[in-house]
Amino acid sequence: MKEIAIRLNGEVRRVAVAPNETLLDVLRAKLGVKTPKEGCGRGDCGACTVLLDGKAVRSCLILAIEVDGQSVVTLEGVGKAGPTALQKAFVKNNVFQCGFCAPGVILSASALLVEKPQPSEHDVREALAGNLCRCTGYAPIVATVLAVAKKSAKKKPASRRARS
Amino acid sequence: MSIAHEFDYAKPASLKEALALLARPVPGGAVSLAGGTDLVAWLRDGAVSPGRLVDLKGLAELRGIRLKGGKLWIGAAATFAEIIASPLVKRHAPLLVESSGLVASVGVRNRATIGGNVCSAVPCCDSGPTLLVHEAVVHVATPRGQKRIPMKQWFLGPRRTALAKGGIVLGFSLPLAKHAGAFAKLKRYRGEDLAQASVGVRVDAKGVWRVAYGSVAPTPIRGPKVERLLKGVKKPDAALLKKAVALAEAEVAPITDIRSSDIYRRLMVGVMLKRAVRLAAARLAGRGPAYGINVMEEDAQ
Ligand SMILES: Cc1cc2nc3c(=O)[nH]c(=O)nc-3n(C[C@@H](O)[C@@H](O)[C@H](O)COP(=O)(O)OP(=O)(O)OC[C@H]3O[C@@H](n4cnc5c(N)ncnc54)[C@H](O)[C@@H]3O)c2cc1C
Ligand code: FES
Ligand code: FES
């Protein structure tokens, strides 16, 4: 066991981990953060997506011990101060059904909008290509991300909070 | 617990320390860890059971993309996301932008490294054909000193490379020259998938062609017969392309597996070669779409 310190959703958290514990397991079982889900456990589905130093990554393929000293943001961090414009639009447009893919989709889309506030449809599809949804189909998800980006062009950036 | 097997973990700060940790005996052996997108998946599956993981992410020698000694240097720990975003790669090896952009999805590309990709050495690795047609050199560190291994001698078989046990790939150097290229990747669907087949081509200002195939032999391979046929022709016409297609079909050795049948792979390699050569020829002439597309997707044609 080794004690690591991560900045989780803006707060420094210390936790003892064994080398063979994945970041996903530690987040869910030891740090009480339940929005990252285990879908495939092999990098395919994106349900376990978290932002590591601002970048969308697969927490099922990362060892917790590797991220000592780094910043991790989960959906809990994105919605900390209330739902973002993107989250509100997703709810309004009813884009999710079971919601299993939702945390990963929201994090991937939020990271995209920070990097590229005015993405093309191709950019959105590319950013979400690794987030599988077995319920809704992707058209409403993509359309909503594009609509939020367009709206935010007139106002302030939609998902600044994703970085926290 | 998703990984049943137990192991030690070390993150050395120097290359010397890393080589020593890889060399020091431990039951199960010591292995390098880069982005973990292959290694952690193998650990979860129980396919490997090392006694020690040596995390290479603390080594400055493996980081960065820069011009060095008249070559483009790409550190082994460069992620595909970093490669795609690099202005230097875009300028000097845009084919690598094209092939890297077709690896997995953003969430994997933010973590997966080019060094890990060629060390895993699966037949479908997307960096293989591109590094082969660039005639890149692999720079390796071992406890007995540093070595340079030409890409052509790198792949020995599925998951087997010329890297000596305990060696570390530092990075790749790519010669600089005016050229154009194209990368074609055949997948079962849009979005992330491993290649059913891939073709990388590169042509220089003298009309010298280099061709490489992925997923159609035990390792990524060069296509010497097609290269000889096209030599000196900057813009091959339909008759020459027809001959090239026949040679391409004959110089690959695909198998049937979960992703496709051998015959489908063989026939598609011809189609892919034709499209990739046309695209590279157009780019050489200053036309054609920007790098970062897949000629096997209908909207790219
Ligand atoms: C969902 C998913 C989709 C994928 N799709 C594709 C795809 O479309 N195309 C494709 O080509 N690949 C694909 N991959 C595989 C790709 O992510 C890996 O091959 C990756 O590039 C390996 O790099 P890594 O840094 O993650 O290596 P790791 O997993 O850390 O290591 C892989 C191997 O290389 C060794 N190693 C790593 N770095 C070094 C070094 N510097 N020196 C010596 N040994 C080293 C390790 O010991 C290990 O044996 C996919 C993977 C996933 C999970
Ligand atoms: S659970 Fe990590 S990608 Fe599916
Ligand atoms: S809403 Fe069910 S998986 Fe996406």
Image (cartoon, coloured by chain):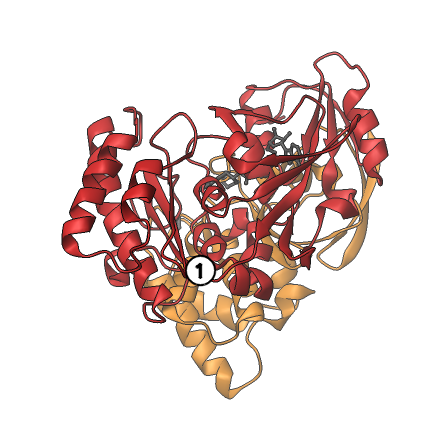
Chain colours: A orange, B red
Q: Position of residue B106 (x, y in %)?
A: 50, 53
Q: Residue at x 19, y 38 (%)?
A: B246
Q: Is residue B26 left or right of residue B207?
A: right
Residue B266 in sight here: yes
Q: Is residue B280 left or right of residue A101?
A: left
**Considering only vertical position in the picture, is B239 above or below A157?**
above
Q: Residue at x 84, y 41 (%)?
A: B13
Identify the image quadrant of the N terminus of chain B. top right
Residue B37 in sight here: no
Work out whether residue A135 or residue A58 is closer to the camera in this orientation and state it.
A58
Q: Residue at x 57, y 68 (%)?
A: A115
Q: Which residue does the numbered mark 1 point to in the structure image?
A: B179
Among all residues in the image, which is located at the extreme left? B239
Work out whether residue A134 or residue B196 is closer to the camera in this orientation and state it.
B196
Q: Position of residue A109 (x, y in %)?
A: 50, 62
Q: Position of residue B127 (x, y in %)?
A: 49, 43
Q: Amino acid at mark 1?
A: His
**Considering only vertical position in the picture, is A4 above or below B168?**
below
Work out whether residue B172 or residue A143 is closer to the camera in this orientation and state it.
B172
Q: Quadrant of residue B198?
A: top left
Q: Position of residue B216 (x, y in %)?
A: 33, 31
